[in-house]
Image: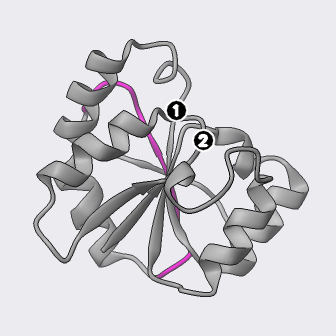
C-alpha cells in the first residue's frame, strides 16, 4: 500500500511512518511528489491516475468543500482524515498517536472498497467514523 500525507501534516511524520513500514508499503509526503502549494484538487486528481494511493489528511475540510469533495469522490481514493484536535498536538504526540492507530488504518484500508473515507479520532478508540459519500 502507498500512503500519501497531505500538506497539513509534517513531512517528518510521513518519513517516520515510512521508516516503520515493511516494503512494498510506503508513506510519502505531498512535498515528495509535488510542489508545496499545489491545490488539493490537483494532487487528488493526479494521484487518481495511479489508483493505489491511500490519503492521510490533516484537512477534514476536503470532506466538506464541494470542489475538493467531488475530486476525492471521483478519484476513488481511500482517505483517512484526522479529526479536529490532531493538528494542535506537537509532532511527538501526533507521531505517537498515529503509530497507535496505524495497524487499524492498514487493516481498514485492506478491507474497504477504494474511495471510502474515514475520520480518525485523536484518542485511539479502535473505531473510525465513516465519511458519508452522498
| Total labels drawn | 2
User: Does 110 sit above or below residue 64?
Assistant: below
Magenta highlight on residue 6? no
Q: Which mark is residue 7?
A: 2
Image-based side of 64 in relation to 88, left or right: right
- The answer to whether one can see residue 134 in this image is no
Tell me the CA gap for discs 1 and 2: 15 Å
Secondary element type, mark 2: loop
Instruction: Identify the image quadrant of the N terminus.
Output: bottom left
- Contact between marks 1 and 2 (CB within 8 A): the answer is no
Q: Is residue 5 above or below residue 33?
A: above
Label 2 crowd (10 A; few <14 / some 14-19 / many >=20): some
In front here: 92 or 70?
92
Q: Residue at x 28, y 36 (%)?
A: 98
Q: Which mark is residue 120?
A: none
Vertical side of 123 occupied by 2: above or below: below
Q: Position of residue 18 (x, y in %)?
A: 24, 53
Write the start and end of the magenta stretch as one range: 114-124
Residue occupying image coordinates x 64% and y 40%: 60
Give residue 106's quadrant in the image: bottom left
* Residue 115 in view, yes or no: yes
Residue under label 1: 83
Depth check, front residue: 119 or 35? 35
Q: Secondary structure at mark 1?
A: loop
- Sequence-wise first label, 1 or 2: 2
Residue 34 appears left or right of 119 = right
| Quadrant of the rendering where the C terminus is positioned | bottom right
Image spot of residue 21 (x, y percent):
15, 59
**Residue 76: % across, % down:** 61, 79
Left or right: where does residue 85 sit relative to residue 127?
A: right
Q: Is residue 120 magenta?
A: yes
Amino acid at each position: 500500500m502507498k500512503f500519501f500525507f497531505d500538506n497539513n501534516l509534517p513531512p517528518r511524520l510521513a518519513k517516520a511512518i515510512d521508516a516503520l513500514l515493511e516494503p512494498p508499503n510506503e508513506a510519502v509526503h505531498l512535498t515528495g511528489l509535488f510542489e508545496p502549494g499545489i491545490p488539493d484538487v490537483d494532487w487528488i486528481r493526479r494521484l487518481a491516475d495511479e489508483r493505489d494511493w491511500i490519503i492521510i489528511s490533516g484537512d477534514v475540510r476536503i470532506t466538506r468543500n464541494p470542489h475538493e469533495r467531488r475530486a476525492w469522490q471521483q478519484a476513488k481514493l481511500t482517505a483517512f482524515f484526522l479529526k479536529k484536535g490532531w493538528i494542535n498536538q506537537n509532532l511527538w504526540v501526533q507521531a505517537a498517536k498515529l503509530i497507535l492507530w496505524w495497524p487499524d488504518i492498514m487493516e481498514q484500508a485492506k478491507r474497504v472498497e477504494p474511495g471510502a473515507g474515514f475520520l480518525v479520532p485523536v484518542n485511539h478508540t479502535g473505531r473510525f467514523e465513516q465519511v458519508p459519500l452522498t
